[in-house]
């Protein structure tokens, strides 16, 4: 799983989508992905809201990218690059 997640992050970077700093390493002959936390700046927490919470969805409910864009437009900080990256 970690290998596929790291591949997905590399593909996102190549497509111009911002990702967290990440690295795939091997520990005891197993792939382990390390990624920098996006919700911290040193000891300071950066508040965030998940798309699921923003849309008022429950765990397991299906959503769509257009619904996420609508939720961001309604509740987000208004940063157009975020909406562009979702599409």
Image (tube, grey):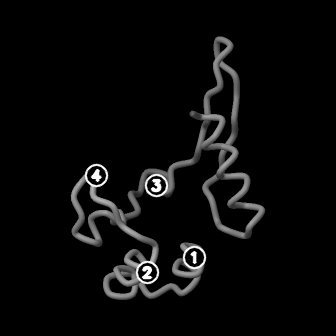
Q: Which residue is mark 4?
A: 60
Report x, y in % for residue 72: 39, 80
Q: Quadrant of the N terminus?
A: top right
Local crowd size for mark 4, using a 10 Å CA cut-off: few (<14), some (14–19), many (≥20): few
Tell me, for residue 62, which label it has, or none. none
Relative to residue 34, is residue 78 drawn left or right?
Answer: left
Q: Earlier in the sequence, mark 4 or mark 3?
A: 3
Out of 44 and 49, give the one closest to the viewer: 49
Q: Quadrant of the C terminus?
A: bottom right
Relative to residue 55, is residue 87 drawn left or right?
Answer: right
User: Is 8 drawn above or below residue 23 in the view shown?
Assistant: below
Tell me, for residue 40, which label it has, or none. 3
Q: Earlier in the sequence, mark 1 or mark 2?
A: 2
Q: Which residue is mark 1?
A: 87
Q: Earlier in the sequence, mark 2 or mark 3?
A: 3
Report x, y in % for residue 28: 64, 11
User: Is 10 drawn above or below residue 74 in the view shown?
Assistant: above
Q: Earlier in the sequence, mark 1 or mark 4?
A: 4
Q: Nearer the viewer, mark 2 or mark 3?
A: 2
């Amino acid at each position: 799983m970690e290998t596929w997640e790291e591949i997905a992050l590399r593909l996102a970077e190549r497509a111009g989508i911002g990702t967290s700093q990440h690295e795939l390493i091997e520990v005891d002959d197993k792939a382990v992905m390390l990624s920098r936390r996006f919700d911290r700046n040193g000891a300071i927490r950066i508040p965030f809201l998940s798309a699921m919470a923003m849309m008022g969805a429950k765990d397991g409910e299906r959503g769509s990218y257009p619904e996420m864009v609508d939720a961001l437009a309604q509740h987000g900080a208004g940063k157009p690059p975020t909406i562009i990256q979702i599409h």
